[in-house]
Amino acid sequence: VLTRDGWVKRVRELKDASSTRTREGDSVTDVLAGNTKSTVAFFTNFGSAYVAKIVDIPASTGYGDPVQKLFKFKDGERVVSALSMDPRLKPAEENLLAVTKHGYGLRFALAPHVEVSTRAGRRFAKVAEGDEIVGVRPAPDDGVLVVVSELNALVCDVSEVNVLANPGRGVTVIKTAEGGNVLGFAI
């Protein structure tokens, strides 16, 4: 279970996500399934991926622990997406799509993020000063919808976003006005 404020915990069984304990003002953002031998990948707003075995995430009936306790996060770094790498649940797509708040997008390989990382994580993107990753999603050959704060939206093919072999900035998916930001995207 991962919360909006970055608290993570492992639970044996969860029947209702809304009944899990969270700190005041916090909410559950992701509930990931998997066996304890599998890994889970946490993608951050600074373009890093942190991968740990599910068994290494502390079990808790309380609030859990901050994810920063497991990894070496930089100041201001936070988790924006998480994926279970359980072979039964792992995305079938070979690539993932990331979009930044200034409208840049990139696709990158899933394979390097299946194995456990160091506490410092692995880079998947280079984010410009003042920019940050909004989210990371599996990237099937489909369309992507990107919505910006000026209430504009764009739909394009995922294939129009380049696949990068190494961490990079990506391509412009949508232009944002001065002071405008990408609110979110969906495949």
Image (cartoon, rainbow, N blue to C red):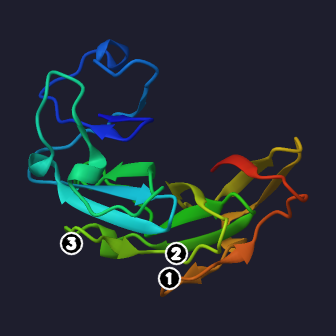
* Disc on the earlier residue, 1 or 3: 3
Where in the figure is residue 163, as x and y percent of width and height? 57, 80
Q: Is residue 141 visible to us here?
A: no
What kind of residue is marked 3?
Thr
In the image, taking residue 134 as reference, residue 31 lies left or right, namely: left
User: For numbered disc 3, what is the local secondary structure?
Assistant: loop
Q: Residue at x 67, y 65 (%)?
A: 130
Q: Quadrant of the N terminus?
A: top left
Q: Residue at x 25, y 60 (%)?
A: 71
Location of residue 135 with respect to 18 vertically, above or below: below
* Residue 22 vs residue 187, the one in the foreground: 22
Q: Residues within 10 Å of mark 2 (few under 14, many from 20)?
A: many
The answer for how far apart the CA atoms under marks 2 and 3 are is: 17 Å
In the image, taking residue 65 as reference, residue 37 lies left or right, namely: left
State the residue position of label 2: 125
Location of residue 126 with respect to 33 vertically, above or below: below
User: For numbered disc 2, what is the local secondary structure?
Assistant: loop
State the residue position of label 1: 167
Q: How many marks?
A: 3
Q: Residue at x 28, y 71 (%)?
A: 120
Residues under numbered marks 1 and 2 in contact, where contact means CB atoms less than 8 Å apart:
yes
State the residue position of label 3: 118
Where in the figure is residue 109, as x and y percent of width and height? 43, 75
In the image, taking residue 95 as reference, residue 42 lies left or right, namely: left
In the image, taking residue 151 as reference, residue 145 lies left or right, namely: left
* Disc on the earlier residue, 2 or 3: 3
Where in the figure is residue 146, as x and y percent of width and height? 74, 51
In this rendering, the label closer to the viewer, 1 or 3: 3
Where in the figure is residue 12, as x and y percent of width and height? 11, 28
What kind of residue is marked 1?
Pro
The answer for how far apart the CA atoms under marks 1 and 2 are is: 4 Å
